[in-house]
Each structure stands twice: as C-alpha cells, then as structure tokens.
Amino acid sequence: MRKFILLSIIMLLLLSACNYPETADYSQDPVVATNVALILTQGAQTQEAAELSLTATPSASETETPPTETQANPETATQAEPSETPTSTEVLSTDPWSGEAAFVEEFDSGDYWDFESGFLYSKVSNGQLEFTSKGTPWWSSWYTTTPEFKNGYVETTFSMPNCQGQDRFGLVIRWQRPGVFYYMGVTCDGKWGFSQYTAGNETIDLLPYEEIFVLKPVGETNQIGIMAEDNSITFYINRQFVGSILVNSEDEAGNFGFLSMSSGSKNFKTLIDKLEYWE
C-alpha cells in the first residue's frame, strides 16, 4: 500500500512539471523584439555616409524680372479713370505632405538597409526594400534610420503581397535606446492601430486595432503616415485622416523606420517603395 502511494506521488510531480505549448495563447504574451538597429555592425564612417546619402537637401531658386516702362505720347495721352485691380491671394496647403520633403528614401542602394538575422530579412532590390519576417509567431523586428525627429510628418508607401490574418507591418517613430518607440501598424485583415513598445519588451496598443475601409486589399499599394506635434499624434492612410491621440509630452526625438510582425505566416513579406519625412 505504501509503495502504491509513493508511486502515485511521483507520477503527480512528473505531470505537474510538464507544459503543453499546443494550448498556449501566444498572442497574449509580451512581444519579444529584435532590435536590428542596435546590432548593425557597420562602422561609423559607413553609417555617416549612408545617412548623408539618405538625406535630401531642399533647394530653391529665385528669378527676378525687371519692371518694364512705357512712355505715352503727351499729345495723345489721356488720363484713364482709376480702376480697382483685383488682388490674388495665394492659398497655402495645410496638408502635412505639402512642399518639399526633407528626407526621401527610394531604396536605390542597399548599403544601409541590407540585413539578415534569424527573424528578419531586409534587402534592397529593383528599387524596393523587401522587408520580411521569417515566421516566428508574434515576434516583432524593426529597423530604424536617421535623422532623429520629434515633430514632423513621416510617410511610407508599401504593399504586402503574401500575408494573412494578423500579420502586421508598422511605421516606427521616436525610437530611442534601449528600444522604446511608437508605431502605427496595419494588418492583413484590414485593420490599423497605434502601439507603444516599452523597454520591458511589452507592446501596449494605445489605439486598439480596428477595421478601416480606406486601407486597400492585400497586394495593393498603400500609404500610411504619422504627423507628430509634441504630444499630439495624427494618423493618415492613403492620405486620408483616420484618427489622432495624445501621448506623453515628455517624449524625446528619435529615429524612424519600419516594423514587421508575423502572426504565423512563414516569410511574411512587405515591399516598401518609399520612405519620406517632412519637417
């Protein structure tokens, strides 16, 4: 009888030490991130050259036309009645993307953007950046670039040709060490949201993901944009306003770039055509 009780206790301890990953809900776990911006091995000289090549310098030209003078014959000249000359008022666009962008990246060179790890593949090819999550479920990887900014408008043009469900692509702003940032994300099932990523590897959805009809279907080209003005953040999809939020006003300037997260799709790919920033 004692042997039977002892054997039962041993079996109970063995069973309690087992876990069953098949029943785990990975979507509720804190997302562990790969900060590829920190583990780039490029030297300072290469980094500086890449930044210079990625930064567009605005240029302006101005021409001055000298006034012309016409003298009338005094014998035939008559004094004309004064008339009101209509004045023209120039209407300036208030769109955040109006005017010349301070930064334009069209992915003509892969020197800065080419990278590969066990979780992310980033490669410039044929004027696009192929940004691919290799398939680890709920694992976020991001890649950021300079210049740092706190206020301004940043926008990217992209397509997601082979995704499904909650696979997510995001536009990152205010990235700071050790990996604290915000990002606007869109999913393959037609939703968008805004999240904060913390130093504790936790994703907080400040604006929960919801369906949006201005987002074009999977495979088509979309644009997402973020306008940051101190603690006010405004969001655009295909240059249509979709929402806004107030965040911590003490947030500092930071890098901007991209985030990719697979919900289980192997080699979830985003093709990025352009990244722009307006001051």
Image (cartoon, rainbow, N blue to C red):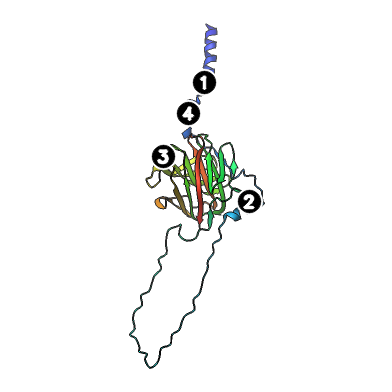
Expressed as whole percent of the image width and height from the top left, the position of residue 126 reads 54, 47
Sequence-wise, the earlier of marks 1 and 3 is 1
Label 2 and label 3: CA atoms lie apart by 37 Å
Sequence-wise, the earlier of marks 1 and 2 is 1
Expressed as whole percent of the image width and height from the top left, the position of residue 225 reads 46, 51
**Secondary structure under the numbered disc 4 in the rendered image:** loop
Expressed as whole percent of the image width and height from the top left, the position of residue 131 reads 53, 43
| Residue indicated by mark 1 | 16
Residue 14 higher or lower than 267, as above or below: above
Tag on residue 47?
Answer: 2
**Secondary structure under the numbered disc 3 in the rendered image:** loop
| Residue indicated by mark 4 | 24
Going 43% across and 58% down the picture, which residue do you hit?
Answer: 95
Label 1 and label 2: CA atoms lie apart by 52 Å
Q: Nearer the viewer, mark 4 or mark 1?
A: 4
Q: Amino acid at mark 3?
A: Asp
Q: Amino acid at mark 1?
A: Ser
Q: Nearer the viewer, mark 2 or mark 4?
A: 2
Label 3 and label 4: CA atoms lie apart by 23 Å
Label 3 neighbour load within 10 Å: few <14, some 14-19, many 20+ = some
| Residue indicated by mark 3 | 189
| Outermost top residue | 1
Of residues 28 and 8, the one nearer the viewer is 28
Q: Is the Cβ of the residue at disc 2 closer than 8 Å to that at disc 3?
A: no
